Image (cartoon, rainbow, N blue to C red):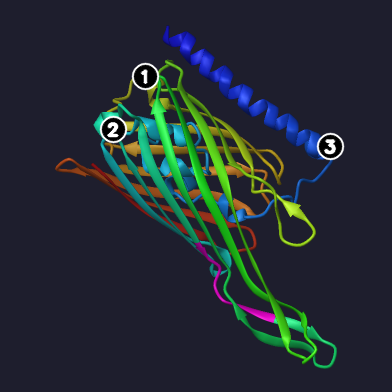
Amino acid sequence: MKLYTTLAILTLALLLVVPFAHAQEAEDPGFQDPDVEKSAQTGFKFLSLSLDPRASAMGGAFTAQDVASSVAMFYNPASMANMQGSFDIAVMQTQFIADINYNAGSIAFSPRDGVFGVFGISVMAVDYGELQETVYDPVNTFQDVGTFSPTALAVGLGYARALSDRFAIGGNVKYALQDLGSFTVGQNEGGNFTTEDYSKGTPAFDFGVLYKTGFRSMNFAMSVRNFSPELRYEQESFELPLTFRIGVSMDMIDLTSMNSDMHSFNLAVDAERPRDFAEQLRIGGEYLLMNTLALRAGYGFPTDTEGFNLGVGLQRDFSGMGFAFNYAYTSYDVFDAVHRIGIQLSL
């Protein structure tokens, strides 16, 4: 009976996703054309960045990971359904290129041992720093008129539930806001500059499924992130960075005679189809020693400038409270390296 239920839910998920893909193709005839470069088709790109150090160190191959924590809302909300405790909180910071800082946090709560599912809240805030605004003046040529500080924010409510011991679904509804600031757009009759505010916000939706195949620890999953209506600043309309992913993961120690309580090597592969970039393949690995020390590495391709990813993590239980610290390093061809740190607590 569980098998039939699982197949029915998988079919329903495909029925929801496939018509949307066809709709995208109808709106954009070049969507399926490999000769068309899918660039600059989306806005709110801050929603595309991987924030969690563990996931980033594995090259972003995180869709099929049985995360079982609040962090899952940033990747595949379905994997939050398998949270063991009743409470989980995570905070993360990313020092991105050009002195751009990402700060994120998530909280998950599982009442009555998950009988009613798992509920979560996620927050992401971006500080782009202070930039100089310059306008063209026919008399003075170029003129500095001050500074502006763009920001971005996304707040989400997530829910996940395990429908069986193998199958889980999850969703996330969020509101994304991007404030580029006020810019000079002209001059009035008195010669004073006139400005216009460029701030936009929109709801967006994420959806994911996680299936434990039953073959050792192999998981299969898919996620669709950043469904949203179109937005427009001036003449050109755009969408959020819609992304479809399919992933598989497995602890490779299951195929050996090694003690699984001492060693674990999680291998994950994600196939990603973004709205505004070529299809990508992401591969990541995590070696865990004595369920305490984690060493991670990952790589995604093709990319423009992003290189390899490395990371380390420490996790321990203290009197029933779980603690984890994670760090990730990402190299870039022409930019400085990106550093990510994160702390997680669970009860």
Q: Position of residue 298 (x, y in %)?
A: 52, 43
| Magenta part, dominant SS | strand
What residue would you read off at disc 2? 84
Q: Confirm whether residue 114 shows in the render.
A: yes
Q: Is tag 3's residue or tag 1's residue first in the polypeptide sequence?
A: 3
**Residue nearer the viewer, 265 or 196:** 196
Taking the spot 44% from the left edge, 44% from the top edge, the residue there is 157
Q: Which residues are magenta?
A: 126-133
Displayed quadrant of residue 46: bottom right
What residue would you read off at disc 3? 29
**Residue nearer the viewer, 190 or 35:** 190
| Amino acid under disc 3 | Pro
Quadrant for the C terminus, please. top left
| Amino acid under disc 1 | Asp
Per the model, the C-alpha gap separating discs 2 and 1 is 13 Å
Crowding around mark 1 (Cα neighbors within 10 Å: few <14, some 14 to 19, many 20+) is few
Q: Is residue 28 left or right of residue 270?
A: right
**Residue nearer the viewer, 17 or 79:** 17
Quadrant for the N terminus, please. top left
What residue would you read off at disc 1? 165
**Element type at mark 2:** loop
Q: Is residue 211 left or right of residue 301?
A: left
